[in-house]
Amino acid sequence: MTALETIRAALAHAASRLGAPPGVDVALERPRDPTHGDLATNLALALAKTLGQKPRAIAERLVATIELPRGLVRKTEIAGPGFINFFLETAEVVGALPTILAAGAAYGRAAVGNRRPVNVEFVSANPTGPLHVGHGRQAALGDAIAALLEWTGWKVTREFYYNDGGGQIANLARSVQARIAQLSGKSVDIPEGGYHGEYIREIAERYVAAHKEDPAGKNLDTVRRFAVDALREEQDRDLQAFGVRFDVYALESALYTSGKVDETEARLVAAGHTYEKDGARWLRTTDFGDDKDRVMRKSAEKGGDYTYFVPDVAYHVTKWERGFSRAINVQGADHHGTVRRVRVGLQALEMGIPEGYPEYVLHQMVTVMKGGEEVKISKRAGSYMTIRDLVDEVGRDAVRYFFLMRKSDTHFVFDVDLAKSQTEENPVFYVQMAHARMSGIFRVASREPDSGTGAGVDLALLTQPEEIELVKELADFPEMVQRAAAALEPNRITTYLEGLARLAHAWYHKYRVLGEPEEAARLVLARAVQQVLANGLSLLGIRAPERM
RNA sequence: GCGCCAGUAGCUCAGCUGGAUAGAGCGUCGGCCUCCGGAGCCGAAGGUCCCGCGUUCGAAUCGCGGCUGGCGCACCA
């Protein structure tokens, strides 16, 4: 049990003896200001109202009541409006180091998820073109969120949903068909709403080469399948280059062929939330707080098809039925309008799916800056920065790191020049460099970085303030991972890593390791820093180089 | 018009789910560098946390009302 867990439990026990209601949430954190101790709690302040006493009086009684094991805390004080500050014995602080080395690559993992299943859906691009930089942000984000959940004990399924059944696919097929016709010299325009990118022409050429029996592309259905397959393959290659893998690829078309869409419509009708108007079938989403009702099946003159949202609902029913009591969708914020509709559709089925199902992580748009100018991204026109272009230009690690270092709900400006630069201004370089420096110490010392556990080393020699600060930062890592996972915010990890790297660089510059009396103890510290940096980076899918 | 998101140092952004004196990088200014990698190091200045009201012992954080910017409001997906 760590010092934090021990004190937290002791506080909870003391609080209950003072008459606090059971199950009070004990906030015990490392204060920003080291003069406020190693750990501090606001428990007395939080209990002031329910106990009807002054915070400082409660704090005094808590301190008098609390039972702590010997050798853990050297001083307890009450400060400010009623904070209780705990000062740990130095041995207890540096005692975190052997724990870190013993856990190794698993340090920071937790079991809070209890192996429960969770589905993380991301990218889910229509197979109508290559993946652009916005998809890249989503790929990095979804993969990191999935990793955070894995690190905290969830059983994660990474899922990609292909909308291969809608009107956009028909546009794609007709666009390719038009290009095929142009290849044989005919003057045919790309249809209204079609795709103009250069990749359409390439697909047309490949179709003609592969289909001698249909050189004019008359068979629209075959053209459609060929184009969708070609683009899916291309997207897969892009994702592979980015180091993202999926466990499940779900196809919208399969929901139709399996009858799942019809079944969902029938259930909605049976549940009594639908009606007919103007020849169309509507879902009364206003029953569930929507501002207007939504069409679920178009009128005959519009083709009589389902609108997109019925297959969307059907798809999420399959997630629920596959046992995912938790589902997270990572999407661009331009789709936020669908959030309520999917949830409402699931509610209208009245099959016991929770109101907040699925959860959403929405991300804002990406603009790319290069040489001080914005790189224009336009899908239909064809001038087009793809995720592969970006990875080729700045490297996989930098792309992933950059996409993860900002909160998802703020607009992100990707600075290509910064991402490529080999200086400390570049945060991914800065963090990786810290890891390389720690590795460098072991290289010079001719020791294997994975040897040793810290056993038998006198860690009491780590007395410098920078060293104590560094150890405390390392000890924070597991809590950090859990909070980032709970908030579904990978950017907390990059922020943490930059802070840790800063402390590591400062320590490295100020103190020598090899040849000093503290060598053995400092090697333990260096290895722990190296390990935590490596763990944080690997969680985010970024390499931790031994040298740069 | 309605909905969602954002507004924090000159710039780019953190801020651990309501805590103590709001932080980092870049930039600016002033010092320093024979070293396990100088691809440097140390320090300083710099704030109406968009505005107002409210809740609270305590608000950048929560609520309400504004202002500014982005996105969305189809029988498209």
Image: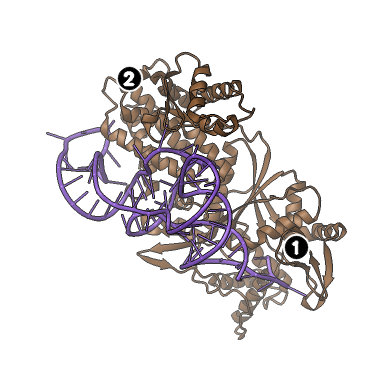
Chain colours: A brown, B purple
Q: In the rendered view, tell whether residue A34 sits above or below residue A520.
A: below
Query: What is the secondary structure assignment of the residue under circle 2?
Result: helix
How far apart in space, not on screen, are marks 1 and 2 (Cα)?
68 Å
| Image quadrant where one finds the C terminus of chain A | top left
Name the residue: 76% across, 51% down.
A318
In the rendered image, which quarter contains the N terminus of chain A? Answer: top right
In x, y percent, where is residue A405?
A: 46, 49
Mark 2 belongs to which subunit? A
Q: What residue type is labelled 2?
A: Leu
Position of A381 with respect to A211 (left or right) is left
Residue at 50% x, 32% y is A42
Picture quadrant where residue A86 is located: top left
Q: Residue A498: x, y in percent?
A: 40, 42
In the image, A487 versus A192, the foreground residue is A487
Sequence-wise first label, 1 or 2: 1
Which amino acid, mark 1?
A: Thr
Is A115 situated above or below A145?
A: above
Counting other residues with Cα less than 10 Å from the Cα at mark 1, is it few (<14), some (14-19), or many (20 or more)? few
Q: What element carries label 1?
A: helix
Q: Estimate the x, y position of residue A143 in percent, counting from the top left.
A: 56, 48
Whether B23 is drawn above or below A188: the answer is above
Q: How crowded is mark 2: few (under 14 residues within 10 Å), some or many (20 or more)?
A: some
Residue at horizontal 64 percent and vertical 73 percent from the top: A208
Q: Examine the rendered structure and indicate whether residue A99 appears above or below residue A333.
A: above
Subunit under mark 1: A
The residue that disc 1 covers is A286
Q: Which residue lies furthest to the top in this view?
A: A70
- Name the residue carrying label 2: A461
Residue A344: x %, y % from top left: 73, 57
